[in-house]
Amino acid sequence: MTEKKCPYCEFDDYDVIDKNDFGVILPEANPLSKGHSIIIPIRHVSSFFEVTDKERKSLLSLLELARNELKLRHQPDGFHVAFNDGDVFGEASEHLHIHIIPRYKGQQLKLDKRWGIVQD
């Protein structure tokens, strides 16, 4: 049996928007809005509640950095920030990733199956 490769451990350095010693900011492969990005710890860990204090602080620092960069680049009106933790919607979270999704006036945010939403 072959092990499934973690897409978040196998990121391309070319895609990195910014990083620090414990995490990176990457563009979301399936964006819900212009600028949708993710913040991931470098260490393979599945839960926000399993990261070390240093990792948590660095991830929050990257989240703020991503917010500031997205405000400069895309001028959104706000942000949706979220992550799934644990066995959510029948899919175990393999590698912690925090979504920062820019929100724009007049543009509805259509959440999908990643968020437990099934649209008919």
Image: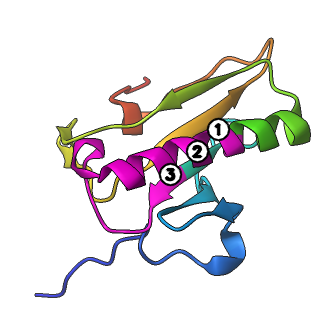
Whether 107 is drawn above or below 43: the answer is above
Pointer 1: what residue? 64
Going by the numbered disc 1, the residue's amino acid type is Glu
Q: Please give the label number shown on residue 96.
A: none
**Residue 38 pos. (x, y %):** 55, 49
The residue located at (71%, 61%) in the rendering is 17
Mark 3: amino acid = Ser
> Residue 103: image x %, image y %?
71, 23
In this picture, residue 58 sits left or right of residue 73: left
In the picture, the quarter occupied by the N terminus is bottom left
Kind of element beneath mark 1: helix
Q: Quadrant of residue 27?
A: bottom right
SS state under label 3: helix
Q: Are marks 1 and 2 in contact (CB under 8 Å)?
A: yes
Q: Is residue 18 magenta?
A: no
Name the residue that disc number 3 marks.
58
Q: What residue did someone put label 2 on?
A: 61
Query: Picture coordinates of residue 64 (x, y %)?
Result: 65, 38
At mark 2, the secondary structure is helix
**Residue drawn at the location 26% of the way across and 77% of the way down:** 4
Which span is picked out in magenta?
A: 39-66
User: Could you tell me how far apart the alpha carbons at marks 2 and 3 are, in whole angstroms?
Assistant: 5 Å
**Residue type at mark 2?**
Ser
Neighbourhood count class around disc 1 (C-alpha, 10 Å): few under 14, some 14–19, many 20 upward: few
Relative to residue 61, is residue 33 drawn left or right? Answer: right
* Dot 2 alpha-carbon crowd within 10 angstroms: few under 14, some 14 to 19, many 20 or more: some
